[in-house]
């Protein structure tokens, strides 16, 4: 009996970014399940009979997709074309779902022979593809990554052991010709030392540096909130881009200013929501309907942007303009919001409040903003304001005693959505301990 053990070298976190190297240790052991005394007596006699032999073993990284959405016919024909000429290992790896990204398999060994109790250890490393989607568990679609370790005995079927990992998306730099400008430091101004070797900076390090600059950039934006009765408040968002684990901090100002106040906010709630919008295959019929692309939907605005423009912060500004401007949308046409998931909520009662703060945390286990050929995952702040035209409870403040609130107040509810962009955090900052995965081959 052979036991296969696989464990990632990164023990504190089984999370990796696109373009990062995954390292794994794989052990093959010939297990013998009987007493030590019996084993010592029969070891010499049955050594030849109890020796295990494995023909080969390989390891590679797969990205699977499970979805209830309908894929286009061209995608299925391409998948069938790719399946022609492959080995029988692909039929085994197709079981969990559709393989959309796969690295080249690496052969660990050929013709391995193990004595009873003998263990052989192998090292596997592979880069996560930059063009793959992140790990995502949605309503109608799932993306997940697994390290597939396959082995086979002589005249036996192929056995596989899978090690799941989580992958976070890292945006690609929009202008590769300006990469040296991104990593410019004061060290380049110092006198050069001919005895020191200049370290080459990888593309992943430059992407992390650029992502840090994008999320640290403070660009306050003010939004005036009003209804048919008048001014309700003013919301200030300090920056439009955030990373996993950060807090979305904003301020709400209910001061009317010079004009008299005619409406007052009783309470409000802010929800951080994730949108899963299905992307239908583009056709000629879609181009003949310009009214559907100008309904104010955030998905129509993000179609013209790639991940590079998202990283540069351009898409966040355009999304806010398209979602908050009433002149650029058709109010009668419904907005395709897709499937919604609420992750954080902040609620406050603010009847007599002039100014307050809004703090909404972003969990570490959620998936950042990304887009594929089938789904567009975005984030937004969903505001719900409960307003009333009853000022000071409808009665003046008494000179003596306490002011009693009325039993009923006429209220109205208004809803407002503000899109935000969520980026990935450093995988080393997210604590997710991994475990050892085993497989017994009898």
Image (tube, grey):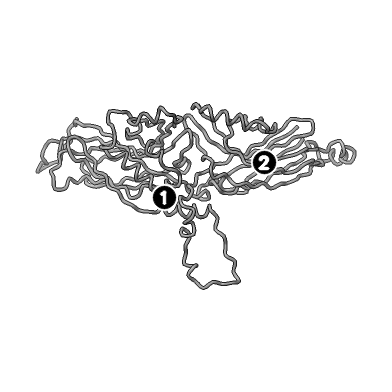
* Residue at 27% across, 39% down: 325
Q: Residues within 10 Å of mark 2 (few under 14, many from 20)?
A: some
Query: Residue 257 at what x, y percent from top left?
Result: 16, 48
Q: Residues within 10 Å of mark 1 (few under 14, many from 20)?
A: some
* Residue at 20% across, 43% down: 352
Disc 1 target residue: 312
- Position of 361 relative to 87 (above/below): below
For the N terminus, give its image quadrant.
top right
Q: Secondary structure at mark 2?
A: loop
Farthest-out residue, left = 399
Query: Residue 62 at what x, y percent from top left?
Result: 60, 38
Query: Residue 163 at what x, y percent from top left?
Result: 62, 39
Horizontally, residue 199 falls left or right of residue 25, namely: left
Horizontally, residue 49 falls left or right of residue 272, namely: right
Q: Quarter-wise, where is residue 306 in the image?
A: top left
Whichever of callouts 2 and 1 sits on the residue coming sooner in the sequence is 2
Choose between 243 and 344: the one closer to the eye. 243
Disc 2 target residue: 105
Query: Residue 396 at what x, y percent from top left?
Result: 10, 39
Horizontally, residue 334 falls left or right of residue 190, namely: left
For the C terminus, give its image quadrant.
top right
Is residue 244 visible in the rendered image? The answer is no
Is residue 180 visible in the rendered image? The answer is yes
Horizontally, residue 166 falls left or right of residue 329, namely: right
- Which mark is drawn over residue 139? none
Looking at the rendered structure, the number of numbered marks drawn on it comes to: 2
- Position of 199 relative to 284 (above/below): below
Q: Secondary structure at mark 1?
A: loop
């Amino acid at each position: 009996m052979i036991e296969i053990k696989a464990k990632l070298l990164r023990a504190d976190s089984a999370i990796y970014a696109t373009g990062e190297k995954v390292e794994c240790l794989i052990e093959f052991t010939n297990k013998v399940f009987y007493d030590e005394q019996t084993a010592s007596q029969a070891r010499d006699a049955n050594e030849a009979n109890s020796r295990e032999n494995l023909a080969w073993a390989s390891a590679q990284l797969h990205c699977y997709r499970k979805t209830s959405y309908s894929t286009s016919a061209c995608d299925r024909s391409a998948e069938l074309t790719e399946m022609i000429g492959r080995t029988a290992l692909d039929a085994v790896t197709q079981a969990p779902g559709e393989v959309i990204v796969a690295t080249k398999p690496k052969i660990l060994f050929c013709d391995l022979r193990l004595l009873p109790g003998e263990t052989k250890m192998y090292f596997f490393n592979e880069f996560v593809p930059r063009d793959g989607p992140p790990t995502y568990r949605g309503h109608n679609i799932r993306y997940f990554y697994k390290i597939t370790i396959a082995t086979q005995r002589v005249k036996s079927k192929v056995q596989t052991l899978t090690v799941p990992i989580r992958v976070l998306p890292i945006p690609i730099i929009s202008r590769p010709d300006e990469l040296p400008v991104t990593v410019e430091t004061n060290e380049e101004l110092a006198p050069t030392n001919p005895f020191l070797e200049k370290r080459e900076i990888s593309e992943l390090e430059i992407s992390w540096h650029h992502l840090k600059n994008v999320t640290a950039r403070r660009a306050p934006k003010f939004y005036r909130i009003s209804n048919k009765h008048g001014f309700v408040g003013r919301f200030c968002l300090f920056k439009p881009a955030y990373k996993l684990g950060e807090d979305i901090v904003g301020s709400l100002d209910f001061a009317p200013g010079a004009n008299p106040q005619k409406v007052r906010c009783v309470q409000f709630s802010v929800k951080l929501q994730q949108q899963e919008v299905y992307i239908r295959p583009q056709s000629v019929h879609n181009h003949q309907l310009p009214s559907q692309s100008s309904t104010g939907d955030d998905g129509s605005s993000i179609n013209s942007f790639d991940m590079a423009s998202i990283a540069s912060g351009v898409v966040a500004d355009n999304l806010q303009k398209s979602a908050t401007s009433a002149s650029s949308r058709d109010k009668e046409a419904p907005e395709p919001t897709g499937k919604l998931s609420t992750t954080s909520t902040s609620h406050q009662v603010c009847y007599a409040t002039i100014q307050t703060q809004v703090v909404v945390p972003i969990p570490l286990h959620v998936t950042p903003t990304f887009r594929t050929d089938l789904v567009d995952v975005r984030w937004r702040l969903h505001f719900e304001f409960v307003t009333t035209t009853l000022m000071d409870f409808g009665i003046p403040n008494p000179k003596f005693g306490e002011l009693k609130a009325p039993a009923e107040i006429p209220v109205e509810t208004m809803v407002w959505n503000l899109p935000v962009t969520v980026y990935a955090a450093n995988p080393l900052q997210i604590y997710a301990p991994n475990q050892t995965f085993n497989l017994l081959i009898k």
